[in-house]
Image (cartoon, grey):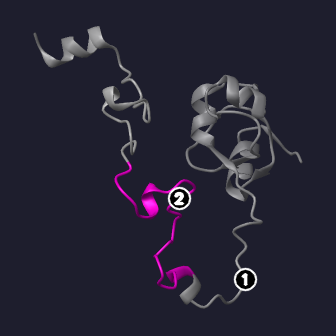
């Protein structure tokens, strides 16, 4: 019997550890927490950046300036070559069609079309944003570009 044959019979999932179920379980009494100390107490959670009594690095470092990271728009990127490969000549390309073609996971994130690749097909593209080079390539091939949202 080989190891890969064993896992087929047992199944892919391991049973979860049931702690605090008495001495017969092997995880009774202290329930795997050991004796005393912060880790044994209810409500203890080691947070990211927790350094015990020492001042955490995040609080030691001075904070200056402004970051736009919280406010920027995240786009789902689609390239011209991907559209060219998945769609026929004269196709209507919008977020719903991109999801059907498997280029996007869902329509929640706005779509931006970028210019990587070439196309000779005429597309009618609707997207939240499009690069100038991508717009140029699509329009040179005889397509239309609409910026929505």
Quadrant of residue 23 within the rendered picture:
top left
Q: Quadrant of the N terminus?
A: top left
The residue drawn where x is 77% and y is 39% is 108
The residue drawn where x is 58% and y is 36% is 82
Quadrant of residue 10 within the rendered picture:
top left
Residue 149 can be seen in this image: yes
**In this rendering, position of residue 130 left or right of residue 83:** right
Quickly name the residue at label 2. Answer: 45
Image: magenta residue range: 33-58
Q: Can residue 34 be found in the magenta stretch? A: yes
Q: Classify 10 Å Cα crowding around label 1: few (below 14), some (14-19), many (20 and above).
A: few
Name the residue nearer the viewer: 1 or 95: 1
Name the residue nearer the viewer: 48 or 52: 52
Quickly name the residue at label 1. Answer: 66
Q: Can residue 45 be found in the magenta stretch? A: yes
* Residue 138 x/y as whole percent: 72, 43
The residue drawn where x is 20% and y is 11% is 5
Q: Earlier in the sequence, mark 1 or mark 2?
A: 2
Name the residue nearer the viewer: 23 or 62: 23
**In this rendering, position of residue 1 left or right of residue 59:** left
* Residue 83 x/y as whole percent: 64, 34
The residue drawn where x is 66% and y is 25% is 87
């Amino acid at each position: 019997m080989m190891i890969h044959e064993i896992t087929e019979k047992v199944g892919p999932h391991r049973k979860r550890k049931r702690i605090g179920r008495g001495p017969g379980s092997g995880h009774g009494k202290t329930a795997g927490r050991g004796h005393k100390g912060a880790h044994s107490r209810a409500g203890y959670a080691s947070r990211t950046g927790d350094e015990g009594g020492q001042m955490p690095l995040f609080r030691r470092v001075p904070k200056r300036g402004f970051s736009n990271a919280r406010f920027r728009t995240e786009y789902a990127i689609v390239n011209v070559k991907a559209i060219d490969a998945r769609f026929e000549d004269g196709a209507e390309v919008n977020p719903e069609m991109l999801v059907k073609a498997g280029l996007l996971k869902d329509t929640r994130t706005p779509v931006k079309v970028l210019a990587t690749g070439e196309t000779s097909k005429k597309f009618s593209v609707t997207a939240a944003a499009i690069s100038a080079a991508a717009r140029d390539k699509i329009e040179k091939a005889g397509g239309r570009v609409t910026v929505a949202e």
